[in-house]
Amino acid sequence: MIVARCFHALKGTIIKSLQTPSESLKKIISEKIVTEGPISFADYMDLCLSHPDFGYYNKGKIFGKEGDFITSPEISQLFGESLAVWIATLYNKLEAPSKWHIVELGPGKGTLAVDILRTLKSLNMAVGLSYHFIDLSSHLKKIQQNSILTSCKGMLQHEKYKNIERYFDKNTSFYWYSTLGEMNFIYSQEYKPQPVIVLGHEIFDALPIHIFEFSTKLGWCERMVDLNSYDQFELVLSKGRNKNVDSVLKPGKLTKTGLISDLKEGDRIELSPASLKLFADICDIVKQGQSASLMIDYGDNRAFGNSVRGIKDHKKLEMEEWLQLPGEVDISAYVDFAALSAIVTKYPELECGDLLPQGFFLETMGISTRIEILSKKHPAKAQSLQKDYERLASPDQMGEIYKCFYTGAKSLNEVYPFTSSIIAEKKL
Ligand SMILES: C[S@@+](CC[C@H](N)C(=O)[O-])C[C@H]1O[C@@H](n2cnc3c(N)ncnc32)[C@H](O)[C@@H]1O
């Protein structure tokens, strides 16, 4: 009997270990649906991307040729260098603070941080800098630490305080956290006067969205993830108005603002309360002093209805297909920057700039001149440098669809290039 039980337990372990992470996650989500009923798309997306064991951001290869997609910092060092130029203009405006902070949300492989640091070091601006990495993924945190250690040729000391890891040398400190909330020491009196620059590249597009849909029969409903008779995930309509319609969509408020009128069968809107919460947390940090934030993502100054997509191996999959592959696919949605701007109006100390297309922003940071210099220095690389530049800046590639969203303390006045004169000159 004991032998039989042991064998049974062992068989369970073997079966468990034979499951792929995606199969394990599929089982977890299926069991949740069986016990709780259909789950919101936001809950499904959150589990797929951020499950601590089987979530997408904890899987092996995500970025680059061998992964599923490539991001601007991974395309070319020119991207991080251009951002560093922007940070440097702010640093000069702040009159070279003796202690200051950069906070990066969702730093991926840490490539952006490495390019920014190299540029700041060359300008002698990395002194007194604390660089804070915020990422939910423990897998990516390790890769980021490795990137920073390699870039500093391993010459960093290490310490761990509670759950927070710190690597440092005499000029610069690097910290890692899972959430912005863990950085609460930044609110302490000691840190208050120190400027903070919060950066986020492709973080908001990765935050969960709810999908609401209008039915002439049932009114506003929510698209939920359910299991069909073949045990496949499918997107179904809730049986009418549910609690998320009331608490997230708030249809009464929407009609009053005139945001939605002339509703037709099947009209959709994607809303991301997780994005609003994260951006309010960013504003809570930025309002503390002479601080600012720059978020870069794909999206526009409006809400979207049908922007969610699943990417695997550099290909856009059909939703029916990617819904069956939890944890294996990059799920993302366009960012509604108007909703983020609306949050800034709640902070009397803060203002935000006009939304600038990435191509325009990079040009104002001198990317064309940098390309010329690099091409002359490395003629053999001139062609590939030009290709990368076009990919980042050209309007028919990433130059228009990706937007730069600035928020900062009013006391900073206008920060280049988010200034009224530049925007008027370029007639944006
Ligand atoms: C699309 S990747 C972008 C990575 C990097 N910024 C780049 O451009 O290459 C999204 C990043 O955000 C992280 N992430 C996703 N959701 C997060 C959350 N709620 N809080 C913190 N990090 C998150 C992921 O682990 C990943 O590092």
Image (cartoon, helix red, strand yellow):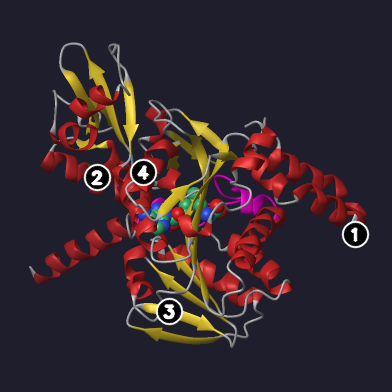
Between marks 4 and 3, how big is the CA–CA gap? 30 Å
**Residue labelled with disc 2:** 29
On screen, residue 81 above or below 172: above
Between marks 1 and 3, how big is the CA–CA gap? 39 Å
Q: Quadrant of residue 326?
A: top left
**Residue labelled with disc 3:** 165
**Residue labelled with disc 4:** 326
Q: Amino acid at mark 2?
A: Ile
Decide: marks 1, 3 in contact (CB < 8 A)? no
Task: Tell me the quarter of the image containing the N terminus.
Answer: bottom left
Q: Position of residue 279 (x, y in %)?
A: 37, 51
Which segment did they paint magenta?
Answer: 54-76
Between marks 4 and 1, how big is the CA–CA gap? 46 Å
Q: Earlier in the sequence, mark 1 or mark 2?
A: 2
Q: Secondary structure at mark 1?
A: helix
On screen, residue 112 above or below 215: below
Q: Quadrant of residue 40?
A: top left
Q: Is mark 4 within 8 Å of ligand 1?
A: no
* Residue 74 falls within the magenta-colored stretch: yes
Q: Secondary structure at mark 2?
A: helix
Within-10-Å neighbours for mark 2: few <14, some 14–19, many 20+: many
Q: Earlier in the sequence, mark 2 or mark 4?
A: 2
Q: Amino acid at mark 4?
A: Pro
**Residue labelled with disc 1:** 377
Q: Earlier in the sequence, mark 4 or mark 1?
A: 4
